[in-house]
Amino acid sequence: MTVSTYLVHLHDNSHDDESARESVAELIHSCGGFILMATNAGSLIAAFDEQFVGHLAAHRAVAFTSGVSLNPNGKAGEKLRALFAHNVAVQLAARDIDPSGGVVAATPASVSAESLPPGYRPLRWRERFA
């Protein structure tokens, strides 16, 4: 089992399709993966086991899936790692799983704005202008 980070880009006609985005996110979660970030371009940055790459790429809404890596010395690298870690922690809480292996009672709804890191933006899909 090798968990890696991937860019999952949706077809252009799926960017505004809420059910398609939810379906892709649910597939990632069903594979034991995590949504690390949603981009402004309609893509997802996700972490999941490499054995599921083909399965995810075959989803009707997915245009392509490709591995990504961060430059550890890059200016945004540390900020992105912190954002990714926070998003995984929120998802683990929603699954009632503690990163250390225990069960937790917290849910994403119980996370207060004060507990979030500075500049944190929740996972949201962009809204296009009409």
Image (spheres, helix red, strand yellow):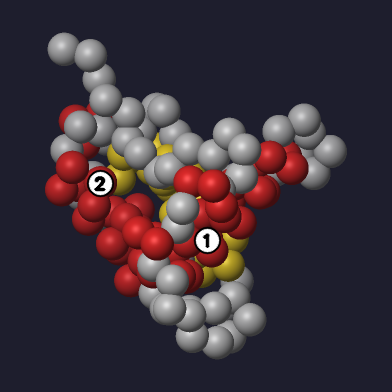
Q: Is residue 22 above or below residue 126?
A: below
> Which residue is more in the foreground, 30 or 76?
76
Residue 21 in the image, given as x and y percentages of width and height: 25, 46
Nearest to viewer (mark 1 / mark 2): 1
Residue type at tag 1: Val
Label 1, secondary structure: give it.
Answer: helix
- Name the image quarter holding the N terminus: bottom right
Q: Quadrant of residue 56?
A: bottom left
Q: For the view shown, which residue lies furthest in the bottom direction?
A: 102
Q: With 2 as the anchor, is 17 left or right in this view?
A: left
Residue labelled with disc 2: 21
Q: Is residue 110 above or below residue 101?
A: above
Residue at 40% across, 62% down: 110
> Which residue is more in the foreground, 27 or 62?
27
Q: Is residue 34 visible?
A: no
Q: For the view shown, which residue lies furthest in the top direction?
A: 130
- Name the image quarter holding the C terminus: top left
Q: Residues within 10 Å of mark 2 (few under 14, many from 20)?
A: many
> Which residue is more in the foreground, 109 or 32?
109
**Nearer the N terminus, badge 1 or badge 2?**
2
Residue 121 in the image, given as x and y percentages of width and height: 48, 38
Residue 66 in the image, given as x and y percentages of width and height: 50, 46
Q: Is residue 79 above or below residue 101?
A: above
Label 2, secondary structure: give it.
Answer: helix
Residue type at tag 2: Arg
Residue at 25% across, 33% down: 15
Residue at 67% across, 48% down: 81
Q: Quadrant of residue 17?
A: top left
Residue labelled with disc 1: 88
Q: Is residue 22 visible?
A: yes
